[in-house]
Image (cartoon, rainbow, N blue to C red):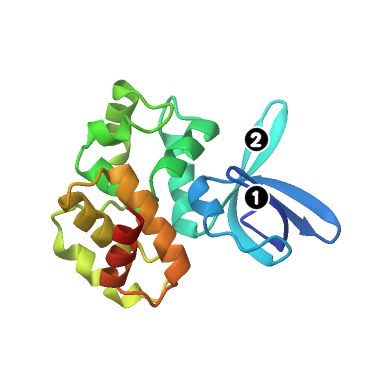
Amino acid sequence: MIATIDGILTEASPLLAVIEINGWGYEVNIPVTTMEKLPSVGKPVKLFTVVVYREDSQTLYGFHNREDRDFFKILVFKVSGIGPKIALSIMSKLSVSVLKNAIAASDIGLLSKCPGIGKKTAERLVVELRDSVNVIDNTNNQLRSHDKDKDSPDGDYRIQDAVMALVALGYKVPVADKNVRHVLSKLGTEASTEEIIRSALGRL
């Protein structure tokens, strides 16, 4: 099992990265949420990976952090009807923190807006994953216990706070989530939730 890949980024597109290691270029399928956090071409990069084996292929999938990688594995290996391509599409539409909250809240409407997901598949996601993933309820004050992880590059609690703030102002969840992720990647791990919200509002 290939758990990580660490090398030089030689090519990057929204759903594919090529990482060179000792003269070998490895194609790694990635979601847009990982592409947004890639360094410039020519720079070192490390991704957390999953290899999906099929009868006629071996495909490598890569993610910016362990949480995204583990969520992808749950989607592909625990939810019937979800393959790697659909899983990447789902994770490209919304960040994992927002997806987990949608599952916790049984938000079928939001989940069904992801590419390749209809109402029945969204309902199956909720039923099969609600007890399997470490979901965080929107109304649960447990969210605040994550403050100690502010320096984490993922900044999940800040993503959730900022997205919820923008939604309260009337913006759609996918739009709010996309803009929050974008500004967080620009501001860095030291940015406060308030700074992220202000910057995201400046893009909307």
Q: Nearer the viewer, residue 20 or 93?
A: 93
What kind of residue is marked 2? Tyr
Q: Is residue 103 visible?
A: yes
Position above or below: 163 against 115: below
Residue 113 located left or right of residue 143: right
Quarter of the image holding residue 8? Answer: bottom right
Q: Is residue 74 visible?
A: no
The residue under the point 57% across, 46% down is 30
| Residue neighbourhood size for the residue with mark 1, other residues' Cα within 10 Å, grouped as few (<14), some (14–19), many (≥20) | few
Q: Nearer the viewer, residue 55 or 164?
A: 164
Q: Nearer the viewer, residue 160 or 26?
A: 160
Q: Nearer the viewer, residue 173 or 156?
A: 173
> Which numbered disc covers residue 20?
none
Q: Earlier in the sequence, mark 2 or mark 1?
A: 1
Position above or below: 196 against 59: below
Q: Name the residue that disc number 2 marks.
A: 53
The location of residue 107, given as percent across then percent down, is 22, 37
Q: Name the residue that disc number 1 marks.
A: 1
The residue under the point 36% across, 56% down is 203
The location of residue 175, given as percent across then percent down, is 33, 45
Q: Tell me the distance, in whole angstroms, between the alpha carbons under discs 2 and 1.
A: 11 Å
The location of residue 178, given as percent across then percent down, is 39, 50
The location of residue 146, given as percent across then percent down, is 28, 70
Position above or below: 198 against 91: below
Residue sticking out furthest to the right: 23
Please, what secondary structure does the residue beneath circle 1 have? loop
The residue under the point 23% across, 71% down is 145
Image mark count:
2
What kind of residue is marked 1? Met
Q: Are marks 2 and 1 in contact (CB under 8 Å)?
A: no
Please, what secondary structure does the residue beneath circle 2 have? strand
